[in-house]
Image (tube, rainbow, N blue to C red):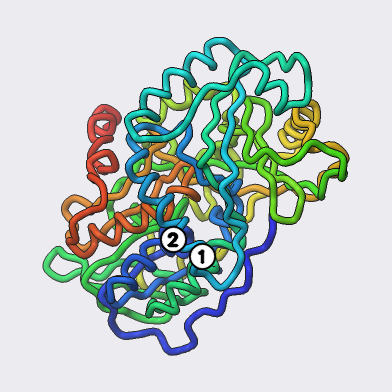
Amino acid sequence: MSEPSPFEASPEALPARADVVIIGGGVAGVGAALALAERGVSVLLCEKGRVAAEQSSRNWGWIRRQGRDPRELPLMTESMALWRRYAGALDTDIGFRQTGCTYLCTTPAEAAEREAWLVHARDHDIPSRMLSRAEISGLLDTRDSGMHGAISTPDDCLAEPSLAVPALARHAQSLGATIFEGTAVRTLMRIGGRVSGVMTEHGPVACDAVILAGGAWSRPFLENAGIALPQLAVRSSALRTGPARANAAPPAGMIGAGGASIRPRRDGGYTVGRAGAARLDLVPAAFRHLFAFLPMLQKRWRIVDLGLGRSFFGPLGHHRWREDEVTPFEQMRILDPAPDARLLTDVWQKAQALYPQLSGAEKVQGWAGMIDVTPDEVPIIDGVPGLPGLVVATGLSGHGFGLGLGAGRLAAELATGEAPCVTPDPYRMNRFAASRKRAA
C-alpha cells in the first residue's frame, strides 16, 4: 500500500463546542464532514490516529455500481455523483478516472447470477451488459479464455485511496471543518438521555449530535456505551505491483474474477486482490453475534478463514472503560495487521496466469486492513434507537471506499434532521433485531 498523503490537522486548541462531532477520519467520516461543512454546520472530526491510515487507504480503490446489493444502489449513485464533483475541486490529482469495471464468470452459475443482476442495472439506469465471447477473449488476449461470461459497466470509476481521502479532508477543512488527528474520543456525554457531547483524551467537547464513523472500531465503542452492534472485523490482504512491460496488454480498467482481481494504479502498476477472501479473527463479539453472521459464513466458508489468537483479548476485544481511563483507541492508534502471505502468493500466481496486463510486472508489496462487516454486508447508517443525538455510519463491508461519500452525506443529513438524499430504511440498525432476540 501507499502511505496516506500528508495531512495537516487543525492547529488550534480543541474547541469547547461544535454543532456535530464526527468520530473517525476514514472516507465515511470525511464524507460527513464535507457534507456538514458545505451546509455551514460547525463540525469537529476527531481521528485517534491519522486520517485514512486504516482501511480507507488500504482498499482496492474501486468506485463501482456494478454488482452491488440492490439496497445500496440509490446511495451509490449519490456517492458516484459526489466523487465526480469533488475530484475536480481537490488540491491533488487523486487518480480519479472513469475506466469501467468488468467481472469475469468462471462457471455457468456465476454467469447466470451476473446476468440476473442486469434487472437492477436497468432499474437504476446503469449501462451494464454481458460481454460476448470475442470481447472476453480480447480482454484476456487469448482465443479461448475458458470463461462462461463477463459483465461490464463502462461508467464505473477508480481512484488512489491513499491520495483521495486526505485530499477530501483538506477540502473539508477549506470549507470550515475542524479536524484533529491523535485525538481519541473515549466516551459519549449525555444529558437527560440525549447525547450532549464527547469526552476525548484531551478533554470534553459539547455538541448537538455525534456521528460514529469508526469502521472496525465502531462496535467496541458502542459496546462500552451499552449498545450492541452486530458488526465484526475481518482481515483482508492485497498487494501492489511495479509497472508492467511496455508491450504488455493495455490497462482495461478494473477486472475481477474469483481467483484474482486487478486495478490499474496511477504509477503504472496494479493493485491485486481476491474478493471476499478474508480472515475473521474471533473476539467475544463473534460469539455474541454468531447467529446473525451464520448465513454469511455458510455462503463464504471456502474463502473466509476463522482464527482464534491474541486478538481475542486485543483492542477489538475490549468493551468496557471509563472516560478517565486510557482506551484501546489510544493503545493502538492505527490497526496495521500482517498480510496473509500464503493467500497473496496464490492470488499473485492466479493473477499472472489470467491477466496479460501484468506481463513483466513484479510484486512490490503486500498489506492487510481490517474491514467492518455486517451480517448482510450492507452498511448501518442510522440514528441509534433510544439514544437521540447519536448517528452511526459503519459496516461498509469491504466496498465502502466508493460508497463512503454517500454514506457520509446520509449520516450528516440524519444528524441534522435534513431530508435524506435517499431513503435510509435499508440501513436501519433494527433490521438485525430478530437475530439478536434468537441469540439471546
Left or right, residue 11 beside residue 198: right
Q: Which amino acid type is marked by label 2?
A: Arg
Q: Nearer the viewer, residue 7 or 86?
A: 86
Above or below, 272 relative to 306: below
For this orientation, the residue located farthest to the left is 192
Direction from residue 428 to residue 15 in the image, left or right: right
Q: Residue at x 61, y 13 (%)?
A: 148
List the single residue furthest toward the top: 108
Q: Identify the disc placed on residue 85.
A: 2
User: Disc 1, disc 2: CB below 8 Å?
Assistant: yes
Q: Which mark is residue 114?
A: none
The residue at the point 28 percent across, 76 percent down is 40
Secondary-structure class at tag 1? loop
Instruction: Residue 69: name its quadrant.
Output: top left
Position of 316 relative to 135 (above/below): below
Q: Position of residue 122 (x, y in %)?
A: 37, 28
The residue labelled by disc 1 is: 88
Residue 385 coordinates in the image, percent (x, y):
19, 50
Please give the name of the residue rendered at 57% of the width and 29% of the height, measured from the top-left corner: 304
CA–CA distance in space, label 1 to label 2: 6 Å
**Pick the front one: 210 or 130:** 130
Measured from the top left, where is residue 116 in percent x and y?
42, 18
Q: Amino acid at mark 1?
A: Gly
Where's the N terminus, which quadrant? bottom right
Q: Mark yes or no: residue 330 visible.
A: no
Which image quadrant is residue 324 in?
bottom left
Q: Is residue 369 above or below residue 131?
A: below
Callout 2: helix, strand or loop? helix
